[in-house]
């Protein structure tokens, strides 16, 4: 899976061959063909692997309050900190998204990822509602759907027209602070026992 | 160009050949090769043609007020009314976006389209500021950048995970009414001589 990641970053999706993946790994092309029917089958497993890794890594998000955790989560999503090949990888994933209408297995895997992302964001928003940090009239499902769409847009524009995702990130931070969070004065009233770490 | 459109919708980008395009047109494959170096060159011209058509068609947007025109513009953008093949075409364009990092001519054309879209939205927002229909503290450039990103996200999610763009459209309509527009009471005060067509 690590070899698939490296080969995808190096060659992109369209040009990728089983040989390219074998060259990045300690396995021969023959061994890869023994385990996977072909590139499509291997990439389906790769998408499963990405989903597992995503779910593992997002089980705990650092931050004192739900809003801080939401900031942190979207930071890491839009500008991954541990990834030298973020740009190449984003492009390869966009190629796979564009193939999804022709490939049901890709569409299924991408849909699972999309749902997992949606659910993780909705949970963080629901936590913020419960703690009284977020406005009572927001809907976690709608907020999550909106943020997932914006995330896809930032990724697509980064690849298609080379627009830095940092610009979307700045928008998202404002959105959390200004649209989701209660004003600090409102919050002081709303937060009964919850420690919301209000600062000005 | 019409033939290219039909061939793209039928075959997608990755599988598209000059032969497919010739079959949709009255020209032979030889004639196409006389005019275009190959598929990449023809598609570059096709993207230019799309931009011209976009600029022509959006010179006048129907609607009484800037907010109505912005609603209408984004409606037409996210759910084109005159297009039976919207889904197939969206997928083909997404494939081209995913190729942009490998193809400078595509990236240049897509960037021009992105800018044209941004500028058209920013103009409509600036009109709404001038007429007093929109809140004075909004920035046309930021609003346009945000809406263009959301548009790309809706297109990508529609192809990748089959999520209907109508959901983003509903969000966008709320955003215009609730975030951009002044409340009708505020507007009555703010709009001095401008006829803003307030109802409530």
Image: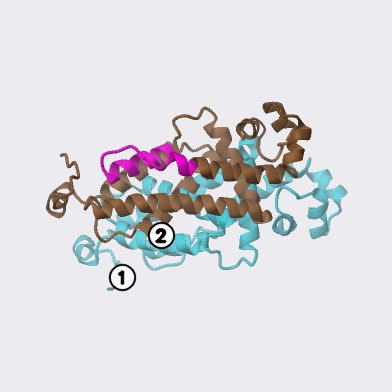
Chain colours: A cyan, B brown
**Magenta stretch bounds:** B54-76
What chain does mark 2 sit on? A
Q: On the image, which quarter does residue A155 sit in?
A: bottom right
Q: Where is residue A23? Give x, y as percent.
A: 83, 58
Chain-order first, disc 2 or disc 1: 2
Q: Which residue is mark 1?
A: A197
Label 2 vs label 1, nearer the camera: 2
Q: Nearer the viewer, residue B2 or A150?
A: B2
Q: Residue at coordinates 41% horizontally, 39% vertically from top-left?
A: B167
Q: Is residue A145 left or right of residue B103?
A: left
Secondary structure at numbered mark 1: loop
Q: Where is residue B155? Give x, y as percent.
A: 51, 43
Asked whether residue B62 is in view, the answer is: yes
Whole-number angstrom distance, CA of label 2 to CA of label 1 = 20 Å
Which labelled disc corresponds to residue A172? 2
Asked whether residue A151 is in view, the answer is: no
Q: Residue at coordinates 62% horizontally, 30% vertically from top-left?
A: B6
Q: Nearer the viewer, residue B51 or B167?
A: B51
B17 drawn magenta: no
Q: Is residue B10 above or below residue A77?
A: above
Q: Residues within 10 Å of mark 1 (few under 14, many from 20)?
A: few
Q: On the image, which quarter does residue A10 sit in?
A: bottom right
Secondary structure character of the magenta stretch overall: helix
Q: On the image, which quarter does residue B67 sit in?
A: top left
């Amino acid at each position: 899976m690590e070899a698939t990641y490296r080969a995808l970053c190096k060659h992109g999706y369209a040009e990728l061959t089983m040989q390219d993946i074998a060259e990045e790994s300690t396995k021969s092309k023959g061994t890869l063909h023994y385990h996977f029917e072909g590139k499509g089958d291997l990439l389906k497993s790769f998408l499963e692997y990405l989903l597992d890794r995503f779910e593992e890594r997002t089980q705990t998000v650092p931050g004192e309050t739900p809003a801080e955790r939401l900031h942190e989560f979207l930071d890491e999503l839009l500008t991954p900190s541990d990834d030298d090949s973020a740009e190449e990888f984003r492009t390869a994933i966009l190629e796979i998204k564009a193939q999804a209408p022709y490939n049901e297995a890709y569409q299924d895997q991408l849909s699972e990822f999309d749902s997992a992302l949606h659910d993780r964001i909705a949970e963080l928003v629901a936590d913020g509602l419960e703690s009284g940090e977020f406005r009572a009239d927001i809907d976690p499902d709608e907020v999550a759907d909106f943020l997932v769409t914006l995330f896809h847009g930032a990724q697509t524009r980064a690849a298609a027209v080379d627009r830095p995702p940092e610009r979307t990130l700045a928008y998202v931070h404002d959105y959390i602070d200004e649209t989701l969070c209660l004003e600090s004065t409102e919050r002081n009233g709303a937060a009964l026992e919850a420690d919301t770490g209000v600062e000005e």
